[in-house]
Amino acid sequence: MGTRLQGRVAVITGGCNGIGLATAKKFLDEGAKVVVGDANAEAGAAIAEELGVTFVAVDVTDTDQVEALFRTAFDTHGSVDIAFNNVEVSSLEDESILTTGLDTWRDVHEASLTSVYLCCRAALRYMLEHKHGSIINAASIVAVMGSATSQISYAAAAGGVLSMSRELGVQFARDGIRVNALCHGPVSTPLSQELVDSDPQTAERRLERIPMGRFAEPQEIANAVLFLASDESSFITASQFLVDGGISGAYVTPV
């Protein structure tokens, strides 16, 4: 057990699998009190029992439900110190701008960008009371560079998360609140496995662009989230924090 987050209250959305679940476990190991928000109530109940976290079923695109999530964290533990806004939704119908329909565009933006806006707003109201806090917004590497295979909606949403994180990081810096965008590369999650199973050629094209030659493990991304949540990153805000296996630094990848 560590103490890097001892006594702090963390809210994690998308916390029932992948990066979110790995981060919840990491935060618990470092002494945090964790509140998990996720749309999957059945999985959430199981995780709450297994890990001893507080679980709230939430649609992160719904203002009232998001407000209720953060209010539960405050009412239960007396504070909101960390928010990891981790809901990112991709779609197999999200491709070229020439073929992606407006409904897909809207659905991806609601889930991946509007949700972050709502969660940031809710978290900030509590953090401002204590003049302290760290917000980490999942943004993906496509926020800073073009995708190997076009995902116009997802890329635009990730860019919006990055820009919003910069704006908030600057606006609230002197209030003791840090806001950073975590721009991660491809991660081995159930969602990425769905892509591999449904479209192996697209998955292989993405893999070829990673200098390290593999997808990240959720625990590796969770390590980065822990750093940004902790006081070890106390002079880092309004940043794009890259955890991408070298993708953004590569002109070509090794064969």
Image (cartoon, helix red, strand yellow):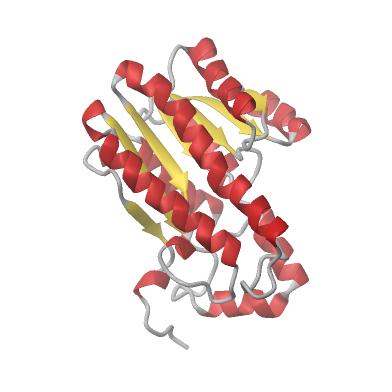
**x 42%, y 41%: residue:** 136
Asked if residue 55 shows in the view, the reply is yes
Asked if residue 30 shows in the view, the reply is no
Task: Determine the residue located farthest toward the front in the rendered image.
Answer: 102
Q: 167 or 234, which is in the foreground?
A: 167
**x 34%, y 16%: residue:** 129
Q: 252 or 93, which is in the foreground?
A: 93
Q: Position of residue 131 (x, y in %)?
A: 28, 21
Q: Position of residue 232 (x, y in %)?
A: 27, 39
**x 43%, y 85%: residue:** 254
Q: Position of residue 186 (x, y in %)?
A: 54, 63
Examine the image and state in which quarter residue 82 appears.
top left
Q: Position of residue 252 (x, y in %)?
A: 41, 85
User: Would residue 52 appear left or right of 121 to someone viewing this image?
Assistant: right
Vertical order, 37 against 199 (above or below): above
Vertical order, 78 against 195 (above or below): above
**x 34%, y 21%: residue:** 128
How many numbered marks does the figure carry? 0
Vertical order, 182 against 66 (above or below): below
Vertical order, 102 against 88 (above or below): below
Examine the image and state in which quarter residue 215 appears.
bottom right
The image quadrant where one finds the N terminus is top left
Examine the image and state in which quarter residue 24 appears.
top right
